[in-house]
Amino acid sequence: MNRFTWTIAVAAALGMAPTLFAQNLVPNGDFEEIQRDETEAPVLDAYGYEAPSGWFRSITDPGAHPTPLTELINPTNMNNVAGDNAGDDSDGAGVSSLALNFVEDASNPPFGVGADWRSEAFETVPGETLFFSIDVKFLGVSQEPYIPDSDIYEGILAQVRSFDQLAPDGGTAGSFKGEHNVTLQSRNFTPGQWTTVTSSFVVPADGFFTDVRVSTNLFIPPSPLFAGQVLFDKLTINRLTADFDNDDDVDGDDLTIWTGNVGPTAAADANADGLTDGADFLAWQREFGLGVVPSAFTVAVSAVPEPGSIALATIGGAMLWMSRALRRFARQQ
Ligand SMILES: [Ca+2]
Ligand SMILES: [Ca+2]
Ligand SMILES: [Ca+2]
Ligand SMILES: [Ca+2]
C-alpha cells in the first residue's frame, strides 16, 4: 500500500463505528483539555475562550480579519451558527469539539477567510502504516458544488503532514516530506449529524514528525460556502501494535503468531517489552479487526484507489493552494 492508496469508509451513524484503535498519536484529539498547561497563560480566541491543549490556531492574516475565524466549542460558548452547542461532542461523553467557521473576508472581498487548526507534532516512523479517523458535523453549510456542474465541492481539508524536525513550540519543522490529504466535502454529509470518516496512509521517508491540520477549503466565489460551520472531534491517528505479521491488519493470523511464540521473545510483542505475553494478547484483542473496515460500516466512498478519487484529492489541494494564492494576489492589488 502506498501513501495514495487510502481507503475511506464513512460510518453513517455514529455508534455504528467500531472502537478499534489502541494508540492515538494526536495530542488531545477529543479536545477535552482546554488550557495548554497550568503554567502557561491560556490561549484565548477573540471571544475570550481558551484554545485546546496541544493545538494551534492559524489565521491567514490576523490583522485583516477582526471576525473570529475559528472557535472552541464549550458549554458556555454560544457563538456557533446553530446556537445549540452546549456540550456538543461526537460521542456524548465529553463536552468539547472544535469548530471552523466559513466566513466571507469582509476586508478583502470577494474571498473567503482561510482558517485552520493545527496539532502539535508527534513522532512517526517512516514507512509505517497509520490509521486516520475524524468525526465531523456540518452546520448551515451549503451542499452545492463550488463550480456548478463540476466535480468540485466544498468542505474542509484534513491534512496529515510529515516533516523531519520538531519546532521549539511543539509543532513540525524542517523539510516537508509529504502529506495525506482527506477532503471532506459538505455534500457527502448530512447537515447536523456527526459522521466518522477513516482512512489509512503510510508515513513518507524521513517523516519523523507529523501533525494534523484541518482547514476550510474551496471557498472562492461563486462559492455558496460563506456561511456555516464544521465541528470536528475525536481526531485520531493510530498505529497498530498487534499486527505481528506486518500485513497492515490485526486478524487471526496475528493471533496464531502470538499463540506460537508466548515467552521471552519479541515475535508478538505489542508493547515493546521484549516479551510475548498476556499484555500483548490484550493488545491483539483491542485491535482485532483494525486495518480491514467491516463491510457493515462501509457506505462509501471507495475501497480501492480510483484514479478519480485520487485526482479529486489532488484537485482539492490544488484548489486550496489556488484560493490562497488568489487572496495573496488580491491583497497586493
Ligand atoms: Ca470531544
Ligand atoms: Ca496482521
Ligand atoms: Ca492479516
Ligand atoms: Ca510484550
Image: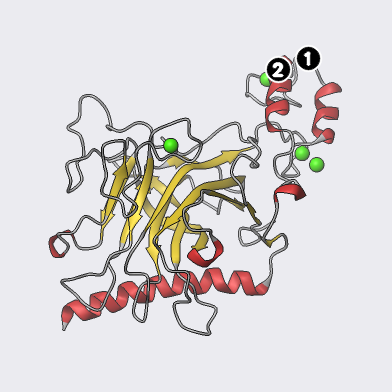
User: Against 268, is 50 above or below?
Assistant: below
Is the CB of mark 2 within 8 Å of ligand 4? yes
Q: Earlier in the sequence, mark 1 or mark 2?
A: 1
Q: Quadrant of the N terminus?
A: bottom right
x then y, percent, for residue 131: 60, 45
Point out which mark residue 275 bears.
2
> Residues under labels 1 and 2: Cα distance?
6 Å
Local packing at callout 1 (Cα closer than 10 Å; few below 14, some 14-19, many 20+) is some
x then y, percent, for residue 39: 20, 25
Amino acid type assigned to the residue bearing label 1 in the image: Gly
In the displayed structure image, the side of residue 300 where residue 80 appears, left or right: left
* Residue 138 falls in image quadrant: bottom left
Identify the element where label 2 is drawn.
Answer: loop
User: Against 88, is 127 above or below?
Assistant: below
Query: Residue visible at 27% across and 32% down?
Result: 35
Query: Residue visible at 68% across and 28% down?
Result: 286
Point out which mark residue 263 bears.
1
